[in-house]
Image (spheres, grey):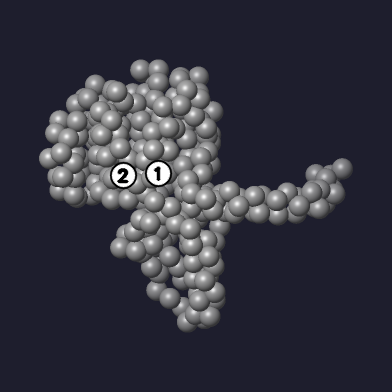
Amino acid sequence: MKTWFITGSSRGFGREWAVAALRRGDRVAATARDASTLDDLVATYGDAVLPLTLDVTDRAAVFAAVARAHEHFGRLDVVVNNAGYGQFGMIEELSEADARDQIETNVFGALWVTQAALPLLRAQGSGHFLQVSSIGGISAFPNIGIYNASKWALEGFSQSLAQEVADFGIHVTLIEPGGFDTDWGGASARHATPDPAYDAFRVKAAEQRRSRTAKSGDPEASAAAVLELVDAENPPLRAFFGEVPLSIAKADYESRLREWEQGQDRAVRAGGR
């Protein structure tokens, strides 16, 4: 039996993974901005669920919630940084609030949870962080540039984290979904004030996005893959979810490698040789 701490448990991936863990007999500290959205989980699974109200941008509240979960269950085995949202808008269109709020939630929120849980996992000599990134965490697309930036930051600190904590018996896995049938682009999304200068390109970007999400994944089906990851003896640092991410990543990285190789002579000259 494992004990989970999951942020953003009210819907989407967080909800599906919490249910999957509870169904198999695990225990879950489930967080949401509005804990009443977790009432049905408590009604069904009783004491196996600890519902917690949490805004992950509040560092003190994050540390208190993680401590409360650990005190209640006695340990934490799987920490899922799932809370986040998508900010839409061309780079020029983003307000300061748009940009800061996106980074506060998607980057600092995950950082605070990670920092709060780390001493507890180190003390027990085991644990697994699941950091919910995106195919947009290794590639980048128009009209979601600040979202891409937030996920690239998550990828960067999580790859460093994995090296820092390996000797303590702690694993880190970045989950990189493609398009899934969640409300990521719907009710939970935020939109910058549009600039008419980008109206024509916005249509093109929307068409590109539809082509990337034509084969949307099923959030419920993703739960089995998550359980496979947390039960693995040597889980991967990165894991794609969905059919599309691999093709996007291959095309992107092949293009990068070509550019880097073509510019190697210049790179050497820039180093003074």
Give the answer, above or below, for where 110 lies relative to 122.
Answer: below
At 46% from the left and 71% from the top, the residue drawn is 93
Residue 168's spot in the image, x, y percent? 46, 19
Mark found first going from the N terminus, 1 or 2: 2
Q: Is residue 185 left or right of residue 140?
A: left
Give the answer, above or below, for where 212 lies relative to 163.
Answer: below
Q: Residues within 10 Å of mark 2 (few under 14, many from 20)?
A: many
Residue 222 is marked as 1
Give the answer, above or below, for where 265 lies relative to 87.
Answer: above
- Per the image, label 1 sits on a secondary structure element best described as helix
Query: Which residue lies most toward the right here?
Result: 273
Residue 16 is marked as 2
- For the residue pair 224 and 123, the one nearer the viewer reads as 224
Give the answer, above or below, for where 78 lies relative to 184.
Answer: above
Q: Is residue 3 left or right of residue 266?
A: left
At 37% from the left and 40% from the top, the residue drawn is 223
Task: Give, as a three-letter code, the residue at label 2.
Answer: Glu
Q: Is residue 194 left or right of residue 208?
A: left
Q: Is residue 117 left or right of residue 89?
A: left
Residue 1's spot in the image, x, y percent? 29, 23
Task: Give, as a three-letter code, the residue at label 1.
Answer: Ser
- For the residue pair 203 and 17, the one nearer the viewer reads as 17
Residue 154's spot in the image, x, y percent? 47, 44
Residue 144's spot in the image, x, y percent? 48, 62
Q: Is residue 237 visible?
A: yes
- For the residue pair 14 and 166, the one nearer the viewer reads as 14
- Per the image, label 2 sits on a secondary structure element best described as helix
Which quadrant does the C terminus fall into? top right
